[in-house]
């Protein structure tokens, strides 16, 4: 869960580096010193900008809506992304998925600016050796929608280990809302998949309830790696595995056109 594991996620000597060092052509994370931080961002940043009323000084930028967004500024091949990692944290899954699938553009969205800046430093550091031209992270808060993504264009959306925000008064910070699910349904292709992982049963129940009410996704809980089909692990997943914390993996297939 977020509060107890974030230190590990941001540790410069974390598992991530040890695990990936065994992968051929893995990123040498030692070249990119990680920032250390334990802080959540200001509560305003978890809300849509129009809900706040005034624009706070430190608020993630909004991006031009499709078709005005210029993907050439973000991806070497100039094309739009096919995969989107929402709440990508320090980007392990995003970067390693992009490395493993160089034909797919992978976009990470993250509300913590320093995490995005660090991911961008890795991307910039690797691009001279013709790697990670297909990876990008944007400083962004998802309650603002996914207007920069074309309807029906995305193959896979990843939404892994969201912050649980247990206390009732903090739950407005949860990004998984009916509006969020509708945006996912809109941008996914007819055969697109929303992948979910969480180690918080309460979050799993809340997300399932929203998905069932929405009605556009067929849910499949994946107990085997084979059913799940994704070989790259997120930072939080590595932590859960190491500490024997159970977590659920759910594939949500878009079943109707929206
Ligand atoms: C517990 S971390 C999980 C990181 C990563 N997905 C993983 O599995 O290791 C949850 C991430 O979601 C990000 N997040 C929370 N609310 C967000 C929002 N409104 N927009 C974008 N990212 C958000 C947090 O900053 C944090 O990095």
Image (cartoon, helix red, strand yellow):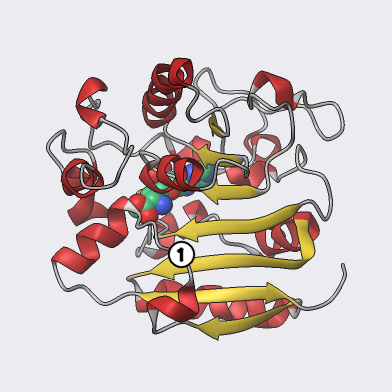
Q: Is residue 142 left or right of 202 when viewed as pictured?
A: right
Quadrant in the picture for residue 91:
top left
Q: Nearer the viewer, residue 205 or 22?
A: 22
Quarter of the figure that contains the C terminus: bottom right
Residue 254's x, y, as percent? Answer: 73, 73
Q: Does residue 108 lie above or below 58 as drawn? A: below
Residue 61's x, y, as percent? Answer: 61, 25
Q: Is residue 229 left or right of 114 when viewed as pictured?
A: right
Quadrant in the picture for residue 224:
bottom left
For disc 1, does the CB lie below 8 Å from ligand 1? no
Report which residue position mark 1 lands on.
230
Residue 133's x, y, as percent? Answer: 56, 27
Q: Secondary structure at mark 1?
A: loop
Badge count? 1
Count neighbours of disc 1 (C-alpha within 10 A) and say few if under 14, some if 14 to 19, many if 20 or more: few
Quarter of the figure that contains the N terminus: bottom left
Q: Nearer the viewer, residue 117 or 56?
A: 117
Q: Is residue 115 left or right of 242 when viewed as pictured?
A: right
Residue at 82% x, 45% y is: 150
Residue 11's x, y, as percent? Answer: 16, 38
Residue at 40% x, 62% y is: 231
Check the image and name the residue furthest to the front.
24
Residue at 62% x, 35% y is: 52
Q: Does residue 171 lie above or below 51 as drawn? A: below
Q: Nearer the viewer, residue 201 or 84?
A: 84
Quadrant in the picture for residue 118:
top left
Residue at 77% x, 78% y is: 255
């Amino acid at each position: 869960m977020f509060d107890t594991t974030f230190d590990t996620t941001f540790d410069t000597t974390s598992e991530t580096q040890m695990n990936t060092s065994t992968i051929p052509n893995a990123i040498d994370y030692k070249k990119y010193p990680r920032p250390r931080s334990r802080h959540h961002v200001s509560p305003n940043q978890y809300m849509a900008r129009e809900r706040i009323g005034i624009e706070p000084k430190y608020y993630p930028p909004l991006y031009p809506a499709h078709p005005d967004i210029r993907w050439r500024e973000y991806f070497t091949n100039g094309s739009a992304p096919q995969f989107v990692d929402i709440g990508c944290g320090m980007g392990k899954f995003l970067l390693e998925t992009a490395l493993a699938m160089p034909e797919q553009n992978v976009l990470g969205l993250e509300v913590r600016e320093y995490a995005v800046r660090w991911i961008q430093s890795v991307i910039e550091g690797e691009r001279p050796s013709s790697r990670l031209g297909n990876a990008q992270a944007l400083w962004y808060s998802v309650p603002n929608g996914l207007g920069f993504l074309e309807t029906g264009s995305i193959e896979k959306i990843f939404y892994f280990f969201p912050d649980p925000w247990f206390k009732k008064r903090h739950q407005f910070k949860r990004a998984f809302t009916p509006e969020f699910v509708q945006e996912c349904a809109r941008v996914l292709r007819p055969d697109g998949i929303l992948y979910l992982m969480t180690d918080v049963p309460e979050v799993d129940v809340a997300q399932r309830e929203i998905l069932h009410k929405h009605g556009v996704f067929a849910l499949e809980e994946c107990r085997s790696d084979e059913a799940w089909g994704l070989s790259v692990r997120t930072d939080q997943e590595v932590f859960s595995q190491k500490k024997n914390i159970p977590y659920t993996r759910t594939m949500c297939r878009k079943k109707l056109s929206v």
